[in-house]
Amino acid sequence: MTNDNPIVRLEGVRLDRGGRTVLRDISLDVPQGRVVAVLGPSGSGKSTLLAALTGELPAAAGTVEVFGRPIPDRRRELLELRKGIGVMLQGNGLLTDLTAAENVALPLRTHTTLPKPVIDRLVRMKLHAVGLRAAADAFPRELSGGMARRVALARALALDPPLMIYDEPLTGLDPIASGVVMALVRRLNDTLGLTSIVVTHHVHETLPVADHAIVIANGGIVFSGSPDALETSADPLVRQFLRGEPDGPIPFDSPGGFGAAPRPAEETA
Ligand SMILES: Nc1ncnc2c1ncn2[C@@H]1O[C@H](COP(=O)(O)OP(=O)(O)OP(=O)(O)O)[C@@H](O)[C@H]1O
Ligand SMILES: [Mg+2]
């Protein structure tokens, strides 16, 4: 994937967590307008990769560029950059004592000085964009899982960020709600002229709406190409991941290895 002005560019990036290298030699260009699926087994480093894009986790080596500029060190500039990145994290992160509309209004209240009538109007537009204008006054507990996820999506869009990143947007949703959310991700990307990075292990729901897919495993990118090429890949690592097999080149449970689940002793340490 080549482009003169990619929205996201990583070159030779290494990411460490807790003194351990999680990802190494990561190079990736995401051109404007694309929907890129980032796939990989649990613990492979997908969320870690996203943390590098928002500047939450500085790269231990290599360069990370977003909107054509390296991630800034200075806090003020970093906060400015983050306003341009809409983030929807695993779960909804909705505030339970606020209505859907109030949740969507939150970033606008925090980061702009717009008068209330303008904010109200923008909130209605965002809720309309995710098909939930009628749910404006509902509290999160009154919404289905899929609807709550769409409110979270509207909130991530509140500041009109050119780049959207989603971490496991389908967790806990049934296949129908998953299809609705993924179709929405694609439609919003195209109608609003966004660029989207979708981290997920829901391969079959995500690939149909993606332009490009990467698979992370064993500490690096093991596949980068079109969704079609991914589905026909003969690479044993890729095949193992797509089929969800425990035996193969991806270690199922190697303590300290990539993709290893934390052992109980480590969790309580
Ligand atoms: N804050 C942290 N401190 C230390 N280690 C961490 C931290 N966050 C993640 N890790 C480790 O980094 C590795 C990658 O974690 P990461 O959360 O990026 O995986 P993931 O691919 O997003 O997994 P999942 O699909 O389960 O969300 C794991 O081994 C994890 O234990
Ligand atoms: Mg994760």
Image (cartoon, grey):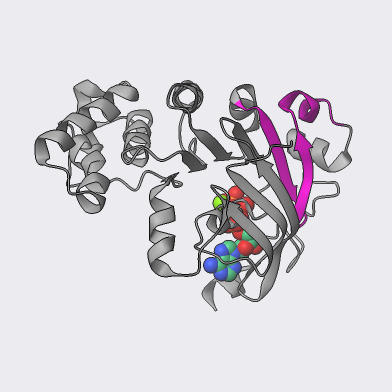
Residue 56 is inside the magenta segment: no
Q: Is residue 131 above or below residue 93?
A: above
138 or 161: nearer the viewer: 161
- Determine the residue located farthest toward the front in the rendered image: 4
Seen from this angle, which residue lies furthest bottom?
A: 269
Q: Which residues are magenta?
A: 210-233
Q: Is residue 179 above or below residue 247?
A: above
- Placement of the N terminus among the 4 image quadrants: top right
Q: Nearer the viewer, residue 67 or 152?
A: 67
Please state, as top left, top right, bottom left or bottom right, where the C terminus lies in the image.
bottom right
Relative to 97, is 195 above or below?
above
Question: Residue 139: x, y in percent?
Answer: 19, 37
Q: Is residue 214 a member of the stretch shown in magenta?
A: yes
- Image: 36 above or below 18: above
Pinpoint residue 248: horizontal percent, then vertical percent: 85, 46
Is any atom of residue 245 visible in this view? Answer: no
Q: Residue 185: image x %, image y %?
A: 48, 28
Q: What residue is rendered at 69% in x and 37% in y?
A: 3
